[in-house]
Amino acid sequence: MQQDFLFLVLMGAVIGILFLGLLAAFLLKKPKVAKETKNFPRAQEILEALKQKDKSLEDLKKCVNLAKIYYNAYMEEILDFDVQFVLLLATHRAVNAKLLLEIESYFKSANPSRKEIVDKALEVGVTNRK
């Protein structure tokens, strides 16, 4: 009887120590930072990519997604990034109206004080479309 009790206490202690060890290992583990966050393309690279007229609609969609994700960082890098982006996108042959309206509404909602400037850039870009 006493041996069974001692065995149960030892098993409980072993399980408790294993549990605490695993808990400590998970809590002390450093989170891995995704490499994509460190190596995102610069604002100038995105604008240069839009200047290339051989880009397809899919390539333009990727540029739009990057502009949405890193909008704040790009605006810090280039003060008129949103205006230049909309202007270049609007002059591109492969772009469709849905993509233009999507990025325009995103930029307007992200920075409401620049609504008129983005509208003007879109208007100029559409009129200069080749």
Image (cartoon, rainbow, N blue to C red):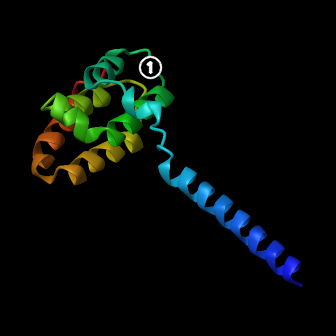
Q: Is residue 126 visible?
A: no
Q: Nearer the viewer, residue 59 or 122?
A: 59
- Residue furthest out toward the front: 2
Quadrant of the rendered structure where residue 20 is? Answer: bottom right
Task: Using residue 16 as the reference point, say whether residue 2 is left or right of it.
Answer: right
Residue under the point 40% across and 38% down: 65
Quadrant of the rendered structure where residue 40 is? Answer: top left
Residue under the point 30% across and 24% down: 42
Residue under the point 27% across and 26% down: 43
Give the total of numbered labels: 1
Quarter of the figure that contains the N terminus: bottom right
Is 106 situated above or below 75? below
What percent of the width, then of the height, locates residue 81?
Answer: 20, 31
Quadrant of the rendered structure where residue 93 is? Answer: top left
Within 10 angstroms of label 1, few (less than 14), some, or many (20 or more) residues? some
Q: Secondary structure at mark 1?
A: loop
Q: Nearer the viewer, residue 81 or 94?
A: 81
What percent of the width, then of the height, locates residue 12?
Answer: 73, 71
Q: Nearer the viewer, residue 38 or 22?
A: 22
Residue under the point 28% across and 22% down: 47
What percent of the width, then of the height, locates residue 32?
Answer: 49, 39
Task: Using residue 115 as the reference point, say whether residue 24 is left or right of it.
Answer: right
Is 45 situated above or below 2? above
What percent of the width, then of the height, locates residue 52?
Answer: 36, 14
Is 108 situated above or below 84? below
Q: Is residue 110 visible?
A: yes
| Residue located beneath label 1 in the image | 55
Task: Using residue 25 as the reference point, say whether residue 78 is left or right of it.
Answer: left
Is 128 situated above or below 100? above
